[in-house]
Image (spheres, coloured by chain):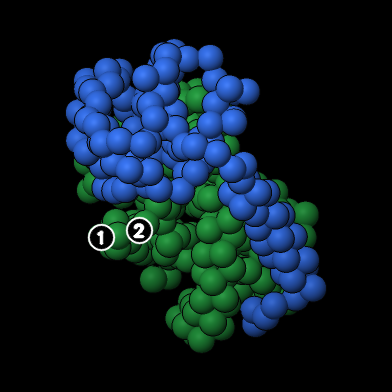
Chain colours: A green, B blue
């Protein structure tokens, strides 16, 4: 994998695969996911441009919902909004706290004031927030608030765990493969 | 090299504590009293007592939703939606934990009797 486009395609495939794999893991609360697909996505923010991240996340959402048989349905709309909010929010977060660089693995990494824990916790919050906002269009306020509070708490918890996994994976695997 | 930084502790700590506080506030400061099932289907609202077993059929946006009530708990037994996420949620006995069928725009959750009078202007059964 020489070019950034090749690497982006690899991350998109990885995100789609982990997302589809995750669909087979039963959860006690519906709509709740472990966020395994967000591990390659959040690492991607440290490696790729905004345009490449839009491609990775778009590909991930379409492929996951294609496999689940829910393409262009309500869950797809929720996921699309959540991912769009994550893309905009985390890109803005990187713009504020990390210096842009042509060689992200070498330069951006050293100047960052945060690790993937912040990225994952924020992404989980933004993703759930996007979903909750869209749900207000279809469902009564109270049901969504009750549901949203459960989702936001568990999302933060899983975001924290995924962030720690991302830090380890990035230090031990990604840096070695992609540099 | 990625390591936890001060900003990581600040952000994750803030979101964890804020979401935990919201969770505790909503679910653990419950009002005492008899429990009812509140169902909303589109613009229609329904109330059912949870003191005896019964089977309900609620008309949703894309077809019927079948709800089963047993002593102090309920579940979506079947639904006309495709993914049946609501059906897979199973029995719910905890107050305020909603079951939602998004395609049918049907939601249901348990409320206390006291809150029933305050909040809902619907049909009682």
Tell me: residue A81, above or below residue A163.
above
| Cα distance between the residues tagged 1 and 2 | 9 Å
Answer whether residue A12 is visible to the viewer in this image.
no
- In the picture, measured across the screen, residue A155 lies left or right of residue B21, that is left
Tell me: residue B48, above or below residue B10.
above
Tell me: residue A94, above or below residue A39.
above
Camera-side residue of B6 and B47 = B47
Q: Quarter-wise, where is residue B33 in the image?
A: top right
Residue occupied by mark 2: A27
Determine the residue positioned at 23% across, 23% down: B57
Camera-side residue of B95 and B35 = B35
Q: Nearer the viewer, mark 1 or mark 2?
A: 2
Answer whether residue B48 is visible to the viewer in this image.
yes
Q: Residues within 10 Å of mark 1 (few under 14, many from 20)?
A: few
What's the mark number on residue B32?
none
Camera-side residue of B60 and A60 = B60
Pointers 1 and 2 in contact (C-beta within 8 Å): no
Q: Residues within 10 Å of mark 2 (few under 14, many from 20)?
A: some
Which type of secondary structure does the marked residue at label 2 adopt?
A: loop
- Residue B14: give x, y in percent of width and height: 74, 60
Q: Quarter-wise, where is residue B106 in the image?
A: top left
Please tell me how many numbered marks the rendered image carries: 2
- In the picture, measured across the screen, residue B99 lies left or right of residue B95, that is left
Determine the residue positioned at 43% across, 62% down: A34
Circle 1 marks a residue in which chain? A
What's the mark number on residue A24?
1
Determine the residue positioned at 53% across, 50% down: A150
- Residue B83: give x, y in percent of width and height: 24, 39
Instruction: Let me know if marks 1 and 2 both belong to one chain.
Output: yes
- Residue B62: give x, y in percent of width and height: 25, 20
């Amino acid at each position: 994998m020489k070019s950034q486009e090749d690497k982006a395609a690899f991350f998109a495939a990885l995100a789609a695969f982990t997302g589809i794999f995750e669909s087979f893991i039963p959860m006690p609360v519906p709509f709740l996911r472990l966020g395994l697909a967000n591990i390659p996505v959040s690492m991607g923010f440290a490696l790729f441009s905004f345009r490449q991240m839009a491609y990775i996340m778009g590909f991930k959402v379409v492929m996951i919902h294609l496999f689940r048989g829910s393409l262009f349905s309500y869950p797809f709309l929720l996921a699309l909004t959540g991912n769009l909010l994550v893309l905009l929010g985390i890109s803005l977060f990187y713009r504020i706290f990390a210096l842009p660089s042509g060689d992200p693995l070498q330069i951006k990494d050293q100047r960052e004031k945060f690790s993937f824990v912040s990225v994952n916790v924020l992404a989980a919050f933004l993703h759930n927030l996007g979903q909750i906002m869209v749900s207000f269009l279809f469902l009564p306020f109270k049901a969504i608030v009750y549901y949203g509070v459960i989702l936001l708490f568990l999302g933060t918890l899983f975001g924290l765990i995924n962030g720690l996994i991302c830090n380890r994976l990035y230090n031990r695997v990604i840096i070695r493969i992609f540099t | 090299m990625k390591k936890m930084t001060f900003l990581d502790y600040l952000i994750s700590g803030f979101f964890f504590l804020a979401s935990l506080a919201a969770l505790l506030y909503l679910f653990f400061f419950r009002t005492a009293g008899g429990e009812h099932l509140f169902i909303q289907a589109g613009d229609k609202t329904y109330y059912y007592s949870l003191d005896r077993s019964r089977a309900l059929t609620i008309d949703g946006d894309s077809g019927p939703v079948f709800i089963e009530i047993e002593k102090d708990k309920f579940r979506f037994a079947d639904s006309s939606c495709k993914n049946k996420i609501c059906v897979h949620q199973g029995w719910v006995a905890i107050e305020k934990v909603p079951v939602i069928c998004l395609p049918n725009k049907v939601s249901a959750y348990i409320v206390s009797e006291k809150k029933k009078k305050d909040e809902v202007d619907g049909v009682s059964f």
